[in-house]
Amino acid sequence: MKNSTRVNHPPSAPLPADNHAVVAPIYQTVKFEFETVEETLRALRGERAGYFYTRSSNPTTRQLELTLARLQGREDCVVCASGVGVVAQTLLSLTKQGDHVLGFIESYGPSRQLLRRTLGKFGVTHTLLSIEDVEGIEQLLAQRATRLVLFESPTNPVNKIADIAAISRSAHAHGALAVLDNTFAGLHQHGAFDVDIYLHSLTKFASGHGDVMGGAAIANEPLIRGLRPDFTLLGGVLDPHAAYLIQRGLKTYFVRYRAQSASAQRVAEYLAEHPAVERTRYPGLPGSPEHALARAQMSDFGAIVTFDLRGGAEAGRRFAEALRLFAMTASLGATESLVMPPQMLGGRDFSAEQQRLAAIGSGTVRLSIGLEDTDDLLEDIQQALAAAAGA
């Protein structure tokens, strides 16, 4: 064998049957092969286990899928390349022309845009209600045939808490699927509810380090079996190396999430008592209108703290620019703390009434609390609030 051939057909180094890698290898390959045509065809027909093409499945991504499914308390999972990708691919897979989707004003901006722009082009209609309008949800579902209800809890960015049991019950009573974007709450929460499909941006708490993107749809096996062919055809595959990084990040998931939640609780308590702050939105605050429902549904209240500065947008700008330990950027759930000032939060697609219901005001600021020392974060917030007030 000439060297130019050898480098393309290197020798294998198989592990003995009783010798296992402690950390699973990264299968950084597009293609897999079987030894015969018949076995290849059997695998393609689903008659035997195995892998053929990474766009369809890969051992590294499959390990991640199985881990995520078990964390959320469901049977199966399909992953893809980003959080918004999993929302888009799930909606495209589950809907057809003439279907109706119920969504909510208090939701991730790109999710609303997918309903308005992308699905609208294909004849899928939608209605946006407030997540707090439980009676209106029931009335709409009773009056209009609906394919699915897409909602979040806690909501982005102001931490409203959805009544998951009531919304799921209403959806199922009228033949709709309950689809919950569970990113803020994390993979270990809300699994006891009768939700059909959980969506997660793995970019956030699952990865946890701000260096890789991914998305996941988690459900029982029949629903995932229906989603997987469309995910394969749409082609938004999660790269095996990205899957490996997310799997690695999960090893510290509980340590990170709980430490960040504890720190966020202290930050929220501080902000709630500060005279420059008009309102603090964090489900762990006993005085919060969402607290009782959050306590009934959640074991940890999350790392996101949202608050309204009395000085409005200009105070929000000064506050964000004065912070030293918070990166002014999008995303959340990373080891470093992040801030989004009012200028980066507004719902530009909202009417005046929708803006009121969304509870995003001129001085609304969103913090994602990282793993820095909490006292350091509080000191930084203190000096930034002073700067926001012009002190």
Image (spheres, rainbow, N blue to C red):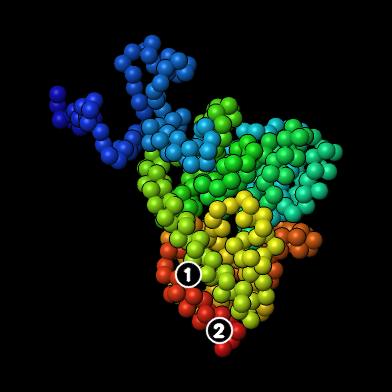
Say whether residue 148 is left or right of residue 235: right
Given the image, on which type of amino acid does mark 2 rest? Ala
Q: Residue furthest bottom?
A: 391
Q: Residues within 10 Å of mark 2 (few under 14, many from 20)?
A: some
Query: Which residue is more in the foreground, 64 or 94?
Result: 64
Residue 23's spot in the image, x, y percent?
30, 40
Q: Which mark is residue 384?
A: none
Given the image, on which type of amino acid does mark 1 rest? Phe
Q: Residue furthest left?
A: 2
Assign the C terminus to one quadrant of the image.
bottom right
| Residue found 62% across the figure and 41% down from its top | 193
Give the Cα separation between the discs numbered 2 and 1: 16 Å
Identify the image quadrant of residue 364: bottom right
Residue 180's spot in the image, x, y percent?
63, 44
Q: Which residue is mark 1?
A: 326
Against 228, is 246 above or below?
below
Query: Which residue is more in the foreground, 298 or 210?
Result: 298
Against 41, is 274 above or below?
below
Q: Residues within 10 Å of mark 1 (few under 14, many from 20)?
A: many
Count of picture labels: 2
Q: Which residue is mark 2?
A: 386
Say whether residue 42 is left or right of residue 89: left
Residue 117 appears in the rendering? no
